[in-house]
Image (spheres, helix red, strand yellow):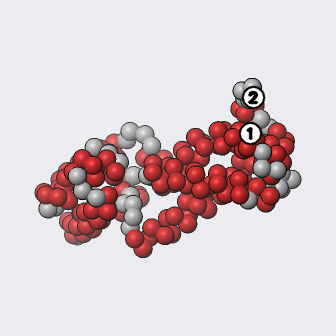
Amino acid sequence: MAEIDTQAFKKADWASCMERVKQKDKQAFALVFTHFSPRLKQFAYRHMGNEQVALEIVQDALATVWQKSALFDGEKSSLSTWIYTIARNLCFDTLRKQKGRDAHIHSEDIWPNDYCPPDMVEHYSPETEMLKQQIVKYLDILPDAQRKVVKAVYLEELPHQQVAEMFDIPLGTVKSRLRLAVEKLRNTIEADKL
């Protein structure tokens, strides 16, 4: 099959592609998958802040596109709108499930959002450096095991899985040490503000 440039695809091209996906045409689905997966990964990563979770959301979203292709109506919306809506809903569901479990710690858990405007998070900013200095200032209050994990995740910006391998501990232990450390840091920072 010749290489098809999906960059030039318009709404009607995607709609006809999806008509073929509805007939379980794997080549048509491969076009959808190849075009949308990198874009969805960026989208999910921005919402979730965790690459592994973002990849799972991309897989789930595109599996839903394949399984529920019959629900797509090209008259009502463009394919990209439909796919991003599926991905956004999966992000919300995942965040809702995590809320009780604190599965992924975000920097907002330590510092309020007004410290670091969301549009600055993706770029180097003085706010980010200020937050890092603040974390360094309070690191000494943490037990050694928690301090090492916080340094690796927040200061060296390593993925949780890599930190687990680095210290030869389970991923769950990395997350629980982070959660405990975040709680202690938050309480200390708030107490110092009083």
Q: Nearer the viewer, residue 21 or 95?
A: 21
Q: Which residue is mark 1?
A: 27
Residue 94: give x, y in percent of width and height.
51, 64
- Mark 1 vs 2: CB contact within 8 A: yes
Residue found 14% across the figure and 62% down from its top = 143
Residue 153 shown left or right of residue 86 in the figure: left
The answer, for residue 94, to whether it is visible in the render is: yes
User: What is the quadrant of the N terminus in the image?
Assistant: top right
Provide the secondary structure element on which disc 1 rests.
helix
User: What is the quadrant of the C terminus in the image?
Assistant: bottom left
Q: Which residue is mark 2?
A: 1
Provide the secondary structure element on which disc 2 rests.
loop
Answer above or below: position of 40 versus 179.
above
Q: Nearer the viewer, residue 7 or 31?
A: 31
Residue found 36% across the figure and 56% down from its top = 107
Q: Which mark is residue 121?
A: none
Residue 17: give x, y in percent of width and height.
80, 42
